Amino acid sequence: MGRVVPPDSVDWPGLFGRFEHTCFRLETLQRYEEPGEADAVQSFLARQEPVIYPDKAAWLAVVRASVAAGKVLRRVHVVSEPLTDYLRFEIGWSYRLNADAGEDIRISRAAAALPRDDYWLFDSRAMARLHYDGDGRLTGVELTDDPAAVVQAGYWRDVALHLAVPLDNWRSAR
């Protein structure tokens, strides 16, 4: 087990600035409470085009810079149906921006086959396991480079990618 730290103490730009080749995110929650995102979610649900909020703009810049440097960012979100309002927002608006910036976004319905752990895996060398409360608020981040934990996360990454479909394919099948 790694050390668990408060989310605001994590050097997120540093984590994303240091990976060399690949970065992977497994998302398993059906709703997240992200800082600064509430207005965009409400706009989307009201069928208005959301404004790109500061945290979203910063993430898109990270994705563009990483892709320009030849790095690969992938994400699999494990979803249940019917989709929550939050997932409709994420899949219908937010992920489209990420994909346009170069992030490989995939969707999976295979919840039973995958763990319920959200995490980031960096170059198959280090990971950040994300801890959330019942409302989808990030409460802690467990940082580790423990080989056993990293190998296990890599295994789950491979399973998740195998069971998921690319965002555009998933959206067109609906």
Image: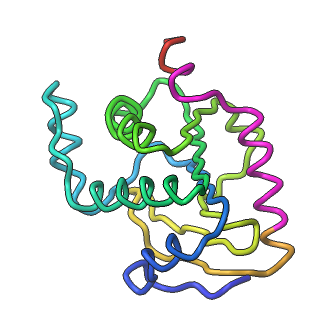
How many marks the image carries: the answer is 0
Among all residues in the image, which is located at the extreme top? 173
Left or right placement of residue 54 versus residue 3 in this view? left
Residue shown at 55% from the left, 67% from the top: 130
- Viewer-side residue, 147 vs 57: 57
- Residue 121 to residue 110: above or below: below
User: Residue 162 in magenta?
Assistant: yes
Measuring from the top left, give residue 166's x and y in whole percent. Answer: 59, 29
Measuring from the top left, give residue 151's x and y in whole percent. Answer: 84, 66
Residue shown at 41% from the left, 57% from the top: 136
**Main SS of residues in magenta:** helix
- The magenta stretch is 151-170
Left or right placement of residue 4 versus residue 113 in this view? left
Measuring from the top left, give residue 59's x and y in whole percent. Answer: 37, 58
- Viewer-side residue, 42 vs 154: 154
Q: Quadrant of residue 117?
A: bottom right
- Residue 33 to residue 84: above or below: below
Q: Which colour scheme is used?
A: rainbow
Left or right placement of residue 15 versus residue 145 in this view? left
Left or right placement of residue 121 versus residue 91 in this view? right
- Viewer-side residue, 139 vs 59: 59
Residue shown at 32% from the left, 34% from the top: 93
- Residue 130 to residue 116: above or below: below
Residue shown at 76% from the left, 66% from the top: 124
User: Residue 159 in magenta?
Assistant: yes
Measuring from the top left, give residue 92's x and y in whole percent. Answer: 35, 29
Q: Quadrant of the N terminus?
A: bottom right
